[in-house]
Image (cartoon, coloured by chain):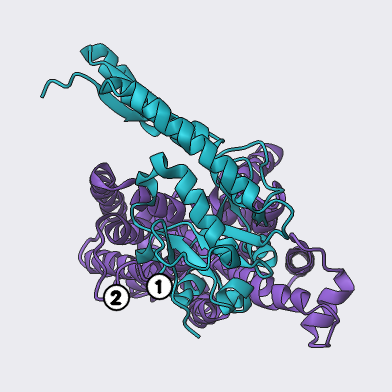
Amino acid sequence: MAPDLILLDAGFQQIGDKLDSLGIPYIIDSSDWEADPMARMEWIKLFATLYNKEEDVIAYFDKGDEKLKEIEDRVKGLDKPKVSWGFLITGKAFVPYAGSYVGKHIELSGGDYIYKEIGPDKTHTATITMEEFYTGGRLSDVYISSGPPAYNTSTQDIIDRGLPIMKDMKPLVEDNTWCYQPWYYQVVHETPEVIEELQAILYPELYPDYKEFKYYWKVPLVE
Amino acid sequence: MNYRQEVATLDYQKTLDKKRSKYIVIYTTITILLITLFLLNISLGTISISFKEVINILLGRPIEDSISTSVVREIRLPRGIGAMLSGAALSLAGLLMQIFFQNPIVDPFVLGISSGATLMVGLVTLTGITMGLPQQSPHILVLAALLGAIIVMFIITGIASKVKNIITLLVIGLMLGYLCSAIINILVAFAEKESIRNFVVWTMGSFSGFTWDRVGLLAGISIPVILSSLLISKPLNALLLGEEYARSMGVKIKGFRLSIVCLSSILTGIVTAFAGPVAFVGLAVPHLSRLLLGTDDNRILIPGAVLLGATLTILCDLLARLLLSPVELPISAVTSFVGAPIVIYLLVKRRDSL
């Protein structure tokens, strides 16, 4: 193998030294660390240069940018639904920092992020106490479990990963718990559509015909 | 008895009484500290609940805010009790191992119990082997850890019954640990990012996953084992003077060695299954107990290590929850940060050797 170029995830930067010594050119992809969703999506412009598709992609990006503004305007002045978001592993709760792109997704879609006080200037994820997770999340309108359906087979599955007390969390009782589709992380280029779908979850009355969920999956309620 | 003998007996009695009083004072102090820390642990947290409310909740009296009742009863209480029992169990397991190997730098994980648990959790999270349970079942990590600990425990007890030299057993335990680590490293090299995240989270250890069911199981196993250890404190004292001496005192060495390995492995295995690997407690608390109590007598040390282990662990859990609240710190980082300076301070102050 003699690659012309290697795309390196920012988490594996240390491999860069080895690639330097071997004389292999590489690009470090830090898109995951972008706090702004559109900045994250903008990385497609860089990738487009590798395939001489810059002009097409710039037009595609600008169109997405306009669409996002429309999505944002659609819910201006409406009451914001409360959103809890996170992932549970053996009683530990991981939630996105308010300053992360997830926090921005919630904001742009018109949601009120329950954990907005946690790391407004930070990207990525925080490990918080179950108490914080539960007391915040119990009154939220929607809960998004940031994992694929295999880790969210039912609301009972989510409770088992957390604590039994979570059984009275409003979104788990009222059948408003969602998780990511398995390809969620592969659709960064469809960021405005992802945010629009989140808005359809938060404001179902605005999207009466929205039935085919492409990016999120409703976790079955088990009573 | 002549006058001199009478004086000597009286002096000895006085020394004994003095020592007994000292032990009572230390036990009482640690117990008060433990109760205080436990109450603090269930009183302090993200949501503010007054101490009076906490007491009312504990006494089963109704209070206005039902969320406070739920948080105290369903989150803080099982976690606090789980942390105390885990600390007590790990400290005792560490003490037993240090006596068994006559080596002050061994901890409960030296026999590879934690490595076995980690390997099984690694197999499940990194490769997707599910042991018949639905893939990604939330209970699978606990079961995997328990199974890993039990498998290594059987291997170790099997070897312990055949190997005469305890240093050989120590080296075998270390080798098992290396072997498990090597397999884990290979699994990590081929694993997906998401799986590695789950695995790393488990290895950081935490008491946050304790539910009443798990506390019940931990208590049901660890308390009888702790009480059994008290029953063997005399032969343990004999073992401190060497196997030959213990044998001359009527201790059946082979069976006794097996029982020490079993008791320590059960305690380590059950805690690791529920809380993941918790560093430092099992190594440091036996030393702290020796330094505080000033004795090697296991009749005194065992209750001391159990009480001190519970106290130090619940303090560390409180700090892990509160220091950067609402962000929670990994428990092993806190136990090491809190425990190491205390041990160094006491060693320097007392100028004692271990």
> Which residue is nearer to you in this view: A202 or B74?
A202
Q: Position of residue B48 (x, y in %)?
A: 82, 63
Q: Which residue is mark 1?
A: B139
Residue A165 rendering spot, x and y as whole percentages = 61, 76
Q: Residue at x 38, y 76 (%)?
A: B250
* The colour assigned to chain A within the rendered structure: cyan
Numbered circle sitting on residue A51: none
Q: Could you tell me the amino acid type at mark 2?
A: Leu
Pointers 1 and 2 in contact (C-beta within 8 Å):
yes
Identify which residue, B268 or B156, lies in the foreground. Answer: B268
Q: Earlier in the sequence, mark 1 or mark 2?
A: 2
Q: Is residue A164 left or right of residue A26?
A: right
Same-subunit check for callouts 1 and 2: yes
Q: Residue B133: which numbered mark, if any? A: 2
Picture quarter with the N terminus of chain B: bottom right
**A179 and A19: which one is in front?**
A179
Q: Position of residue B57 (x, y in %)?
A: 79, 81
Determine the colour of chain B.
purple
Q: Is residue A35 above or below residue A158?
A: above
Q: Chain of mark 1?
A: B
Amino acid type, label 1 = His
Figure check: B122 above or below A178: above
Q: Is residue B69 left or right of residue B294?
A: right
